Amino acid sequence: MTPNDPRSLEPADVIPANAGENSADSRPVDPAPDLVELLKKAETEVADLRDAWLRARADADNTRKQAQADIAKTYKYAIEKFAEDLLPVKDALEQTLAAENVTPETLKSGAELTLKSLQAAFGRAQISEIDPIGERFDPHRHQAMMTVESREPPNTVVTVYQKGYLINDRVLRPALVAVAKSASQEDESSSAGCGASTSGGR
């Protein structure tokens, strides 16, 4: 073969006609446009989340402030209804004191009516009496002033010196009471008395 013979060309020297096109298509694609779009989308989502968080925070603050205002109003006016119920009691007392030439029977009748009004006001305010005569001594509701000899079982309330009061289930004031002695207390008292008598005889 001669140098000018096309068949004399080696395979490495043969360049395909579409070699340039394949070379252009094989270049890497630029990822920058996709990253910019993703970044913008992320920024939008962050802004939306921040706006939602700020709104939720504002709503929570408003709810808290409203709750505090409601609680303050409740404390301020909680006694309003009870005070309103006490006004007729005060009116009755003032009318009784202003009356002239009043007989003891009239005073007693007026006092009884006034007491009924007061008891009604107490009932509407859920205030109840503690009058434990004949009941077992309860240290949470009763205050023992003394122990006394009695035919009642030990630790029984035998005398009420002053009534106590509850508001709902909470003690406003314990009842002042006297409680029956137990047998051991009576024996101790007797022993102490005997000892004192012996000492005096010596």
Image (cartoon, rainbow, N blue to C red):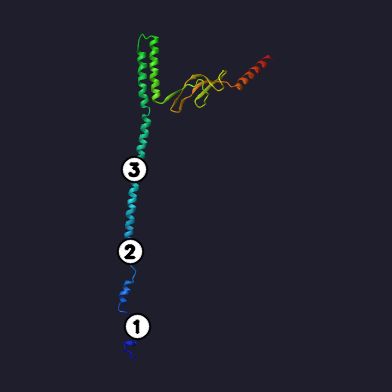
N-terminal of the pair, mark 3 or mark 2, is 2
Q: Which residue is mark 1?
A: 13
- The answer to whether 25 is drawn above or below residue 53 in the figure is below
Crowding near the residue tagged with mark 3, few <14, some 14–19, many ≥20 C-alpha atoms within 10 Å = few
Q: Which residue is mark 2?
A: 32
N-terminal of the pair, mark 1 or mark 3, is 1
Residue found 32% across the figure and 51% down from its top: 48
Mark 2 secondary-structure assignment: helix
Crowding near the residue tagged with mark 1, few <14, some 14–19, many ≥20 C-alpha atoms within 10 Å = few
Can you give x and y, in whole percent of width and height, for residue 78 in the image? 37, 29
Q: Count of labels shown?
A: 3
Crowding near the residue tagged with mark 2, few <14, some 14–19, many ≥20 C-alpha atoms within 10 Å = few
Q: Look at the image and tell me in which quarter the N terminus lies.
A: bottom left
Mark-to-mark CA distance, 1 and 2: 38 Å
Q: Quadrant of residue 150?
A: top right
| Disc sitting over residue 199 in the figure | none
Q: Indicate the amino acid at tag 2.
A: Ala
